[in-house]
Amino acid sequence: MKNIFIGLMLFAGIYSFAQEAGKAGELLRNEASTTEMQSTKTRGFDNRNNNSNNSGFRNPNNQNNKGRNPNYQWNQNYGYSEVFLRIPEMGYFTVELGDQMISNNSGKYRFFDLQSGRVPISIYDNGFLIYRTTLQLRNNNRLVLDFFTNNGLYLLDSYPVQSQSYGFNDWNDVWNDLYGNNQSGNWNNSGNVMDNNTFRQFFAMFQRERFDDGKIALVNQQMRSSQFTSEQIRDLVKSISFDKNKLMLAKSMYSKCVDKNKYFLVSDAFDYESSKRELREFIAK
């Protein structure tokens, strides 16, 4: 019980931080020496962050690289796939899969957060290309493969996995805003909140659903790519027929609210005081 309480307190502490760089998490000390950071290393890597054709690691002290990608936003529709590859041979291999690359001599290569669809895979032995093909990745699925230098690449299995099963679903709740996207200081405002016109269209579709299950399913689908204001959430919750379903929807939408300081407005959607009290207790936790 004590461990559960400590875990909840740690999670609450993380959740309450803003996304400004340095506000969330423990800073781990950079153990690379100045000499190491000033030298290049080329085996198995190319300089993908540089527009030139020169190879080698990017120098972390290069000030020209500071603050790049200032307009970066998470692509919620990117998809999610995994690939596990084994090379049961002695040697130092590099596997390049889409925009990811892994080099080691352990023979195990595990790729996560891959985009679904046709993705090229290349295999290098000590820097020399020895095999290249294309994989067909399906969303929320993992491919398991074996590779042998003299025989080729074998697809052993494909099976479903839970998408982004990392213990929490909304990465933006805990990650730092390294590139300064949240100029307002409000870490909830990620720029994809529904405008009034779009919400009216969505609400009309929402009301055409006859039963609570259909309405909730429609909202759950939209929450993957959109955020909502407290007033919008109140209107959606109020249109649900049963209080238990209203409460379930109000709880699930709390993480997608851009103005949580106004979430008290959602209480107006409930018919019973007990439901209002349970929502307040949920938010307090």
Image (cartoon, rainbow, N blue to C red):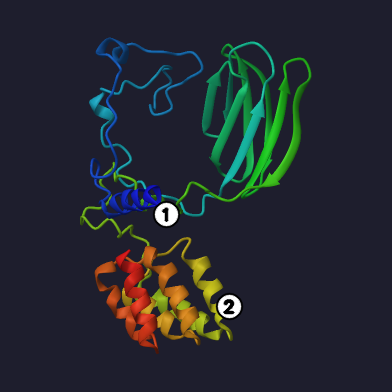
Residue at far right of view: 151
Q: Position of residue 43 (x, y in %)?
A: 49, 13
Q: Which residue is outermost to the front?
A: 1
Total label count?
2
277 or 221, nearer to the observer: 277
In the image: residue 79, left or right of residue 279: right
Q: Residues within 10 Å of mark 1 (few under 14, many from 20)?
A: few
In the rendered structure, which amino acid carries the disc numbered 1? Asp
Residue beneath the point at 34% across and 46% down: 175
Residue bearing mark 1: 170
Looking at the image, residue 39 lies above or below residue 78: above
Answer whether residue 88 is visible to the viewer in this image. Answer: yes
What residue is drawn where x is 32% and y is 74%? Answer: 280
Q: Identify the element where label 2 is drawn.
A: helix
Residue 86: image location, x then y, percent: 67, 25
Using the image, determine if residue 129 lies above or below residue 250. above
Q: Secondary structure at mark 1?
A: loop
Q: Quadrant of residue 229?
A: bottom left
Check the image and report above or below for 242 versus 10.
below
Which quarter of the rendering shows the C terminus? bottom left
Q: Read off the residue under disc 2.
A: 214
List x then y, in percent, for residue 180: 25, 46
Left or right? Give the position of 101 relative to 9: right
Residue 229 appearing in the image: no
The 10 Å Cα crowd at callout 2, few under 14, some 14 to 19, many 20 or more, is some
Q: Are marks 2 and 1 in contact (CB under 8 Å)?
A: no
Q: Is residue 272 left or right of residue 88?
A: left
Q: CA distance from mark 2 to mark 1?
A: 23 Å
| Residue at screen point 65% across, 11% down | 90
Name the residue type under label 2. Gly
- Residue at the location (41% across, 74% down)? 250
Residue that sits furthest to the left in the current view: 184
